């Protein structure tokens, strides 16, 4: 009696239980080798199915899809495309995990399109009852055009059924379950025309992947379809979307998940964490905790960094010979680098928390929870993190938008995040509010100043949501979202993963956006400390002479302050500030505010420091003195510069304007073009100008 040898390949996503099935099928009859030329392990085992049929069972490396991105995945494709391989499968057994069934089916539909006899194993069937999952097997078998075997290697059932199906492999369907040409009719029609006798999906894989196809030269095929790399990527995305649409449709009838029937701990936790009320309450509780800590903890290193760089600048100034180079280092480069380093604590702390939440599995629940609400505004559930992180600083916030896979949603999130009231706006708000809003309490406890601050926060948040809504309508970015909620298991975060994430994000900020921030700081330094006027060099003498002519004697501190004031006023920035006065006059600002608006383009909080210099208050940042000077300042007609109308106008301006070079730098880094930061700058600052104008004209 002759013995028939057949090849069986076990294919599936990582961790679906391939090796477990393999072990059950082959017992100890295994042999481990390497795939030729590469270091991916190859496991071959043997199984005597009947007296006449022996199977070679191949345990392939885990792969998510046939759109290969790793060596492991290439191994699978190369085997499946190479009919002459002596291990080319007579039967492909695709192993899926019932808990990740939807995601696992993507690979199945691809394998199925290769028209090899296929069996679909749904493993971990023991998890169905505790998860409240039930399946309509008849429907699934019909739609997917396959035999389905329910297996639990843990409980040990289903393996015999699988063996029987393999034995009957000749009667298995080889029909594809999805029409590959529906990915892109036009493209596939061309393919069909050029290669009438080839399997379309195989051709597609040859074109899109780095694999060789026996009879045909890969380049020959590719060249006749000269598609650019980005076109191919788009087609691959289209494929994924089409396949998920098909899978979603199939599962609508094929699978029911009734969470209320679920009984395990994970499901119970899920129920609480994604609950309509408790879910939000817990999430906002956690957020509160996180942002409290970000503010509290990062203020310590931030103060330290601030002081250190100030000391360093001072040291350089006093120890290097006076001159242009020393000034460049001590006033341009060192503060510029300081302006980059100062963000590191916030970035590091934010990503520390985000990675812990992600690693633990909690973040997926939040995304699931928020997705419905956010989607209405063109955002994603994952936009919650950037939007809320924006209250600390837009820089780490924009970086955290990287988690959003859908490009349009990510772009909208990046564009609107700077509207959120960040901590750099606080000193500006604080001084302006204290100037124009009386320190009174409503109903005895409700602080008017506090209420104003709250309104400003709400304005920022409202503007972010509103612009997202608008952008969603007008942005013509073609990406369809297929939302696969992956609910990973809860687990303790791995310290190593968390640390790597934090370090990587920090590095990418420092070496990406950092360069632009440094450049802008140096440019602003140059403009602030240089002047076309020759009198600039004699600033100190002029200040002293002026005082003398008024019959005053200045002490050393006063000379210093007045000299810086004189210099700032006569520098390029001062000149620009003065020359923009006609443009900002309708907003209620004078040239002093003009200068402060320009310098605070580096960072909003610089506004206060610049006004302090202009009013020559000195470096001790004594708020009360700046305040009283600002309060006393009057226009030519005797009205106060900082009155209610101009104050509100300024508050609105700082609420909406893109007054932050670092944010622009990060947006450039994250979107890889200057287009989007320019859109932000023009739209936000334009909008700020108009609202400030309207407010002042109404209130004055
Ligand atoms: P592979 O990566 O596809 O080779 O998957 P493994 O065979 O290594 O299994 C991954 C994990 O799933 C292991 O922790 C197994 O113990 C577990 N596992 C495998 N089969 C079952 C099953 O039938 N039920 C349950 N509950 N767990 C299983
Ligand atoms: Mg394995």
Image (tube, grey):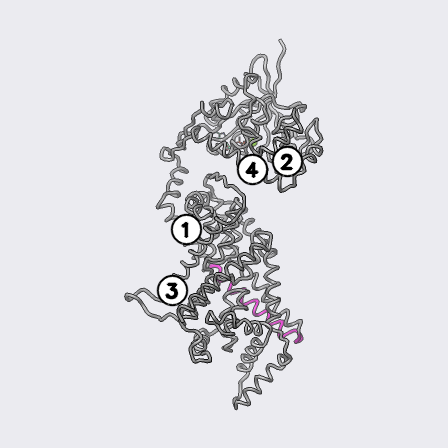
Q: Which residue is mark 1?
A: 286
Q: Report how far apart the C-alphas of labels 1 and 2 lie in the structure.
A: 44 Å
Identify the mark nearer the N-term, 1 or 2: 2
Identify the mark nearer the N-term, 1 or 3: 1
Residue 659 is left or right of residue 632, and the answer is right
Q: Which residue is mark 2?
A: 208
Q: Give the secondary structure at mark 2.
A: helix
Query: Which residue corresponds to the image point at 55% horizontal and 25% vertical from the top-left?
Result: 176
Q: Which mark is residue 452?
A: 3
Q: Nearer the viewer, residue 145 or 486?
A: 145
Q: Nearer the viewer, residue 275 or 317?
A: 275
Numbered disc in front, either 4 or 1 = 4
Q: Which range of residues does the magenta coloring cover?
A: 297-323
The quadrant where residue 155 appears: top left
**Quadrant field for ligand 2:** top right
Query: Which residue corresponds to the image point at 36% horizontal and 33% vertical from the top-left?
Result: 261
Q: Report how far apart the C-alphas of labels 2 and 3 lie in the structure.
A: 57 Å
Q: Give the secondary structure at mark 1.
A: helix
Report crowding for label 1: few under 14, some 14 to 19, many 20 or more residues within 10 A (C-alpha): few
Identify the mark nearer the N-term, 2 or 3: 2
The quadrant where residue 456 appears: bottom left
């Amino acid at each position: 009696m002759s013995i028939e040898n057949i090849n069986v390949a076990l294919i599936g996503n990582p961790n679906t239980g391939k090796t477990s099935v393999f072990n059950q099928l082959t017992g100890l009859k295994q042999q481990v080798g390497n795939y030729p030329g590469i270091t991916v392990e190859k496991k071959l085992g043997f199984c005597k199915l009947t007296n006449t049929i022996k199977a070679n069972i191949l345990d392939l490396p885990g792969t998510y899809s046939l759109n290969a991105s790793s060596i492991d995945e290439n191994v699978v494709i190369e085997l499946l495309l190479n009919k002459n391989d002596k291990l080319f499968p007579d039967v492909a057994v695709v192993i899926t995990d019932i808990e990740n069934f939807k995601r696992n089916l993507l690979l199945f539909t691809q394998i199925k399109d290769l028209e090899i006899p296929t069996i679909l194993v749904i493993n971990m069937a023991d998890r169905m009852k505790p998860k409240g999952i039930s399946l309509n097997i008849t429907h699934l078998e019909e739609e997917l055009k396959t035999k389905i075997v329910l297996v639990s290697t843990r409980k040990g059932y289903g393996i015999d059924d699988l063996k029987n199906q393999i034995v009957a492999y000749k009667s298995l369907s080889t029909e594809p379950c999805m029409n590959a040409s529906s990915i892109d009719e036009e493209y596939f029609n061309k393919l069909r025309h050029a290669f009438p006798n080839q399997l379309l999906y195989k051709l597609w894989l040859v074109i899109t992947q780095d694999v060789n196809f026996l009879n045909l030269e890969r380049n020959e095929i590719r060249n006749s379809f000269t598609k650019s790399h980005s076109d191919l990527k788009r087609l691959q995305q289209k494929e994924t979307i089409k396949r998920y649409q098909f899978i979603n449709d199939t599962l609508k009838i094929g699978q029911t998940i009734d969470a209320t029937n679920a009984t395990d701990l994970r499901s119970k936790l899920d129920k609480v964490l994604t609950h309509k009320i408790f879910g939000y309450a817990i999430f906002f509780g956690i957020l509160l905790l996180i942002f409290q800590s970000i503010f509290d903890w990062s203020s310590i290193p931030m103060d330290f960094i601030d002081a250190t760089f100030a000391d360093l600048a001072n040291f350089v100034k006093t120890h290097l010979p006076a001159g242009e180079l020393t000034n460049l280092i001590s006033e341009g480069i060192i503060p510029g680098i300081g302006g980059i380093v100062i963000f590191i604590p916030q970035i590091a702390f934010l990503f520390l928390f985000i990675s812990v939440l992600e690693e633990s599995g909690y973040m997926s629940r939040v995304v699931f929870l928020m997705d419905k609400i956010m989607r209405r505004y063109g955002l994603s559930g994952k936009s919650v993190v950037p939007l809320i992180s924006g209250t600390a600083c837009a820089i780490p916030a924009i970086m955290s938008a990287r988690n959003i896979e859908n490009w349009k949603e990510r772009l909208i999130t990046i564009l609107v995040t700077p509207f959120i009231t960040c901590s750099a706006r606080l000193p500006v708000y604080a001084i302006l509010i204290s100037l124009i809003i009386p320190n009174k309490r409503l109903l005895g406890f409700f602080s008017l100043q506090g209420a104003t601050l709250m309104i400003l926060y709400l304005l920022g948040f409202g503007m972010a949501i509103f612009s997202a809504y608008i952008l969603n309508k007008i942005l013509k970015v073609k990406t369809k979202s297929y939302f696969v909620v992956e609910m990973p298991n809860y687990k303790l975060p791995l310290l190593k993963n968390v640390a790597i994430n934090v370090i990587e994000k920090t590095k990418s900020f420092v070496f990406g956006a950092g360069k632009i921030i440094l450049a802008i700081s140096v440019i602003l330094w140059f403009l602030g400390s240089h002047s076309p006027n020759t009198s600039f060099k004699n600033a100190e003498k002029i200040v002293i002479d002026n005082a003398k002519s008024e019959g005053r004697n200045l002490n050393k501190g006063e000379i210093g302050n007045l000299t810086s004031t004189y210099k700032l006023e006569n520098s390029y920035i001062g000149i620009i500030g003065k020359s923009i006065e006609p443009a900002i006059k309708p907003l209620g600002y004078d040239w002093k505010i003009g200068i402060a608006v320009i310098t605070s383009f580096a960072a909003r909080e610089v506004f206060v420091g610049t006004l302090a210099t202009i009013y020559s208050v000195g470096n001790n940042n004594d708020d009360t003195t700046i305040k009283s000077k600002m309060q006393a300042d009057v226009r030519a007609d005797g009205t106060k510069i900082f009155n209610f109308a101009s104050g509100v106008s300024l508050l609105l301006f700082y609420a909406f304007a893109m007054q932050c070079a670092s944010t622009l730098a990060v947006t450039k880094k994250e979107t890889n073009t200057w287009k989007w930061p320019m859109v932000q700058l023009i739209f936000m600052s334009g909008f700020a100008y108009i609202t400030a104008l309207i407010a002042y004209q109404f209130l004055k």
